[in-house]
Structure formats: C-alpha cells, structure tokens
Image: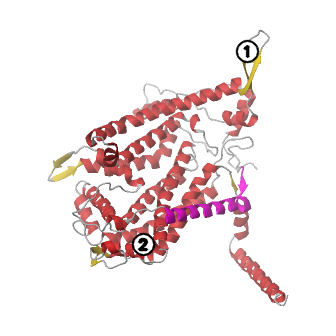
C-alpha cells in the first residue's frame, strides 16, 4: 500500500510520455492514417498463406543466431597447430576459420546450439520459401498486379541459395572445401573469362588465401543487406496490393474477406513466430547437423566419399554427375561442356524461366485482367502440369547427386544407376506433365459430375420400378460456388495466312494452353453469379 501512490504516478507519467511522443510523431508524419489503415488490413485465413511467414521467421532466427556467431568466428585462412578442446584434432594444422568453428562448438557457452540452430534455420528458410513459391505458382497468385512481387520472390530464392552456399563454405572443413573445389571448377569452366574470373575470386590458384574472408563479407554484409531490403519491399507490396484469397461466397475479385491485422492476425502471427523459433531451437539442440570435427580440416589433396552439399544445392551436384564427359578446344581454349552446361547454363535457364514465367503466361494467354482470387490447380491443367514436370526434373537431379551413396546402399552398379538417372531426367518430366494434366482433367470431370448428380449420401433406395440404387444429395451452396467460380478462357483464334511467325507461335501456344477444359453444368443464373465474382476490380477503388 505504501508503494501504491508512487507506482500509480510512475504509470501515469509513462502513459503521458507515450501520448506526447505519439502526438509529436503524428504532427510530423501520417502516423494515424497509416496506422489505422494498416491495423485494419484484412488477411484471409488459410493455412497455405502461412508458408511465407515461416520463411520470414526463419530469417529472423538466422539474423539473431548469425549475429551471435560473428562475435566468435575468425574468417582467416592462416594455418596454425590446433590446441583446442577437441582432443582427436590436437596438433593438426588447421586454418583460423576451422579452429574458430571448433572453438564455437566446444568452448563457447551455447555455441554449438546457436551454430546448429543457425544451420537448421537456413535449411528451413530455403525450403519454406520454395514451397511458398509453389503455392503462389499453382494458384496463379503471380498474375497481375503481382508480377513484380513474384520476381522479387524468385530473386530472394536465388539469393537464399547464394547465402546458404557462402555460410556452408565458411568452416573450411573437408566437406565444405570439396564444395569449394567444385565451385572453382564451375567458375573456371566459363569460356574465355573463366580462368581470369577464378584467379580474381581466389586471388590466385585454388585454394588461395582470401576466399574465406571474402565469402565472410558476402555472407554477413552484402547478401543479407540485399535480402532484408527485398523482404521489406516484398512485404510492403503485399500490404499495398490486395491479398489473394480462395474463392467462396462473399469473396470476389473486388474485395478481401479475412481477419484484421490487429488483434487477430497479429496474435496468430506472433504465435507462429514463437512456434517456428522453438522448433528450430529444438532441432539445433537435438538433431546434429554439419559435424565439422568428424570431417576434419580441408586439404586440397584429400577427398571423402558421401560428400553431399545441402539439399538445395543437390540438383547442381546431380546435373554434374549425369552430364557426359564432353570437352572441346577452340582458339586455344578448352571448353568443358561437362561442367559449363549443367552448372552454369542449366541453372541460368531455370531461374530465368522462373523469373519470367508471369510474362510468358500473360503473353501466351493475352490475360490483362487483375486477379485476386486463387485458382484451384485442377482448373489450370497446363500450368499445373508444367509445375509438376519441373518438380520431377529437380527431384531426379537431387537424387542423382547421391548416386554413389544409392549404389553403395542398394549394391547396384554405379554406371547402370547413372544411365537410369540420365533417362529419368528426360522422360520423368514428360511423364509427370502428361499424368498431372490427365489428373487435373479427371478432377474437373469429377466436379462436373458432382454438380450434375450430387455427392454420394451413403443411402440406398428403391424406385417405383423396383430398381435399387444409391441416393445422391445436392452439393452445398458453398461447395457449388467454389466449383463454379473458375475461369474458362477460350483458345485464341487462329491467325490468318498473312500473320507473322511470332503471332502464329503465340496462337499455337495459347491453343495448347487452353485447349483441354471440362465444362461445368450449371444454371445460367449460377454461371452469371460466378462470372460476377471473377469480374475485374473497379478502376476507382474496391467494393466495401
């Protein structure tokens, strides 16, 4: 009771200081208007929209754990005799970088936990970002007006791979050194300029003495700065643009139905942040990852079996292993096609296609309307089939990156297994495309049958003629609406004989893209209502 008066006065002063500070800021910046609009921003409620948040909170864990690790890591390549706490390596020549990683793991309080949490967060970040991009791709959420945001996301994914590779290489152990040797080979395989570029990056012949300090600067300064800037731009565009939503009654292309940012979305998002952070810390404490003390320090004349990169770089390893040993000489230069094509050209084409796909689809389909309702993957069979083909292509390359381990475990011939992977990397995507497209069309036909006949009720009845059959019940209004609210664009008209080749190509691709669709049986009123839900937003603003 004696402290009640001073405590109340202290609280009053703090409250008054907060009010005064807010008033000062509000007089000089549009705090109230921006805050009111932001706090009432609607966010649709669906689990698939949380994938991007998992990637965001993984970045938060990466920043916190990475900041702690920078206090103890020494990015030097000067050799010393190891005299630390790990007995089996005492007396061996190791670099400053490797010795500092051992010191973090065995001598710094909580160092191993933070280091392993950092590594797990990097893996989860790339995985969550990749799955988030799959969700955006298969639902068509990259279309106008979100093409730029898709390109930012694709750039984030590419930077995530670069950031992960740089961090993976910093310990200078035998495993990461083997990956660095591969990177040097990839750089020097670039025709004409590759040798000069490799000498510039490594400051001489491999392994050099500056590559680890340079990777350290890139890992902790350059790439994180660009990553955080792009993440900020991505989030600003998500807030500025309408959030996509799944089709349902009351949801149209002109509104967004969901929970406001405060307090519902903020509470849920904060809970997800704590959950992601807790899981990553548990993984860091219970699941061992990258035990550099088992690999030993890097030696240019040493290599170990079962040397695999992190999963997100495994497709490059697989592409290198599947490529035949093709080389050619021209103008005094040796061109290593067996390295240049799978490790430089192939990734470049993949990421170029990833970034430019929204432009390609808009050009092929001629679709210039804004889209804020998500497509069901079955309603876009060609796009879904293309995505499935790319996933299978990536999966085959990823599996091929461990062909030596698979051959050893299952006791099969490595040459035979490599030949099987070479066939699968060509045939697998084609089969995946055809099967996925047929699956989508079959699901469309199933939806059409449900609209016409209803869904199974589990009840058997007898008609007046004595026939026995199952009784169906009509679909619910919500489900009928979800099935009917889909676009069924027609293939473009065939151009005349005097049309240019580019126009004829566009018409052919458009016909291929939209040729296969299953019409839905419905009343004209229902179709009109569904068409209204897909109507383009009004130029002057959104509907309430």
Label at residue 257: none
Q: What residue range appears in magenta?
A: 257-286
The quarter of the picture where residue 466 lies is: top right
Q: Residue at x 63, y 57 (%)?
A: 240
Q: Is residue 251 magenta?
A: no
Rendered view: 37 above or below 522: below
Q: Quadrant of the N terminus?
A: bottom right
Q: Residue at x 39, y 65 (%)?
A: 291
How far apart are the alpha carbons under marks 2 and 1?
73 Å
Residue occupied by mark 1:
468
Q: Residue at x 59, y 58 (%)?
A: 53
- On screen, residue 357 versus residue 28, left or right, reads left
Q: Is residue 279 magenta?
A: yes
> Count the marks: how many?
2
- On screen, residue 495 versus residue 539, left or right, reads left
The quarter of the picture where residue 518 lies is: top right
Label at residue 105: 2
């Amino acid at each position: 009771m004696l402290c009640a008066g001073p405590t109340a006065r202290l609280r009053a002063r703090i409250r008054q200081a907060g009010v005064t500070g807010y008033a000062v800021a509000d007089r000089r910046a549009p705090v109230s208007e921006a805050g009111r609009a932001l706090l009432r921003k609607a966010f649709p409620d669906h689990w698939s929209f949380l994938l991007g948040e998992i990637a965001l909170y993984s970045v938060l864990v990466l920043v916190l754990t990475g900041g702690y690790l920078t206090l103890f890591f020494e990015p030097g390549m000067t050799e010393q005799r190891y005299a630390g706490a790990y007995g089996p390596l005492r007396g061996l020549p190791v670099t400053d970088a490797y010795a500092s990683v051992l010191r973090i793991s065995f001598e710094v309080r909580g160092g191993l936990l933070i280091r392993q949490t950092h590594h797990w967060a990097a893996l989860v970040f790339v995985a969550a970002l990749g799955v988030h991009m799959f969700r955006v791709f298969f639902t068509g959420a990259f279309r106008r007006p979100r093409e730029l945001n898709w390109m930012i996301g694709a750039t984030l994914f590419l930077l995530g791979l670069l950031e992960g590779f740089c961090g993976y290489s910093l310990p200078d152990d035998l495993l990461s050194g083997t990956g660095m040797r591969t990177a040097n080979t990839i750089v020097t395989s670039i025709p004409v300029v590759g040798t000069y570029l490799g000498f510039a990056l490594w400051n001489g012949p491999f392994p050099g003495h500056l590559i680890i300090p340079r990777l350290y600067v890139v890992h902790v300064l350059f790439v994180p700065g660009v990553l955080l800037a792009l993440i900020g731009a991505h989030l600003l565009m998500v807030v500025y643009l309408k959030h996509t939503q799944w089709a349902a009654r009351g949801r149209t292309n002109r509104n967004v139905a969901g929970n406001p940012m405060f307090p519902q979305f903020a509470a849920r998002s904060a809970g997800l942040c704590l959950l992601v952070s807790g899981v990553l810390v548990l993984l860091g404490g219970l699941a061992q990852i990258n035990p550099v003390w088992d690999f030993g320090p890097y030696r240019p004349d040493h290599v170990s079996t079962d040397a695999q990169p992190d999963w997100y770089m495994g497709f490059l390893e697989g592409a290198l292993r599947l490529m035949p040993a093709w080389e050619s000489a021209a103008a005094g230069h040796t061109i290593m096609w067996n390295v240049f094509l799978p490790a430089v050209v192939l990734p470049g084409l993949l990421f170029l296609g990833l970034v430019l796909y929204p432009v390609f689809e808009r050009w092929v389909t001629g679709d210039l309307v804004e889209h804020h309702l998500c497509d069901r993957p079955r309603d876009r069979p060609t796009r879904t089939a293309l995505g499935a083909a790319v996933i299978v292509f990536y999966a085959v390359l990823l599996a091929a990156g461990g062909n030596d381990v698979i051959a050893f475990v299952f006791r099969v011939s490595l040459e035979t297994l490599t030949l099987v992977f070479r066939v699968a990397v060509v045939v697998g995507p084609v089969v995946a495309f055809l099967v996925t497209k047929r699956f989508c069309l079959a699901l469309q036909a199933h939806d059409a049958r449900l609209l016409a006949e209803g869904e199974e009720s589990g009840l058997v009845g007898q008609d007046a003629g004595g026939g026995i059959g199952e009784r169906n019940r009509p679909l619910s209004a919500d489900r009928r609406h979800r099935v009917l609210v889909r676009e069924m664009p027609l293939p473009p008209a065939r151009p005349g004989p005097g049309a240019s080749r580019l126009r004829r190509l566009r018409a052919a691709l458009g016909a291929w893209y939209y040729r296969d669709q299953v019409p839905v049986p419905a009343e004209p009123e229902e179709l009109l209502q569904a068409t209204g839900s897909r109507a383009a937003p009004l130029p002057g603003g959104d509907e309430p």
